[in-house]
Image: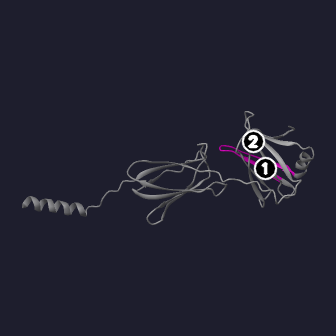
Amino acid sequence: MIRRLILSLLFTLASLLPCQVYASLADIRVLDETKSGFGDVLVIVQSLPNKNEIFRALTETNGNVPRHDLKPGLYRIIATCPYGPCVTVVREILVSQEIVKIDLIVKFKPIVNDFTIYDSGSHLRIKVLEANGSVSQGARIIVRDEFALEEHWYSTDINGVAIIGIAAGETSIIVVVTSNQLEAQTLLNDEIRNLQKKHTQLAIKLNANSINEDVK
């Protein structure tokens, strides 16, 4: 009887003590389809039961998110691109008391070349080359005017080629983006018209400081 009373008392005391909840370290990375780090992706972590936001952060160059502690429970992770064309990814996770390591694969949005807003003489063929001279398949090309009031996205084909439309205005800014590099060049529209008259293909070589003409 005394033993039962003591056990009951200990159980009551234990129930009154605060429970220590251990937090898990969340190690989240965002990668593109080539498994390279995807920078400038906005990652939002929410509590799944009540949808409260726990934290949000932009990935750095290697696709890493600043580490945060998460208590055990259900969470939702949202990865989206506020600065570029990628497909938003939503994933639910269950956190226990172990280190949480999550790799999110974020795909680029399919880019459809739409030239209907341009006249037939305003197209330009561009070939993107890697530093070693090989073609750069799937490189993204942004064509915009000086103030980014008009902007269009393209993607190179298996031969590293894209046919772009020329932005309105006196200059066109051509930006080539790969998984780990960005190259930008400003061209006067007179220069572009001259290339068009010569039926000259423009070759952009990554890691180069200039854009060179390619007469192939």
Location of mark 1 (residue): 174
Residue at (78% x, 49% y) in the render:
174
In the rendered image, the quadrant that contains the C terminus is top right
Q: Residue at x 12, y 60 (%)?
A: 6
- Residue 104 placed where, x, y %? 54, 50
Q: Main secondary structure of the magenta part?
A: strand
Q: Is the residue marked by circle 2 packed among few (<14), some (14-19), or many (20+) residues within 10 Å? A: many
Q: CA distance from mark 1 to mark 2?
A: 15 Å
Q: Position of residue 163 (x, y in %)?
A: 80, 49
Identify the mark nearer the N-term, 1 or 2: 2
Residue lying at the far top of the rendered structure: 132
Is 108 positioned to the left or the right of 69 in the image?
Answer: right
Q: What residue would you read off at disc 2?
A: 160
Question: From the image, which quarter does the N terminus lie in?
Answer: bottom left
| Disc on res. 136 | none
Vertical arrangement, residue 50 with respect to residue 122, above or below? below
Of all residues, the one furthest to the left in this rendering is: 1
On screen, residue 166 versus residue 102, left or right, reads: right
Report the number of discs.
2
Q: Secondary structure at mark 1?
A: strand
Where are the magenta residues, as a range?
Answer: 172-188
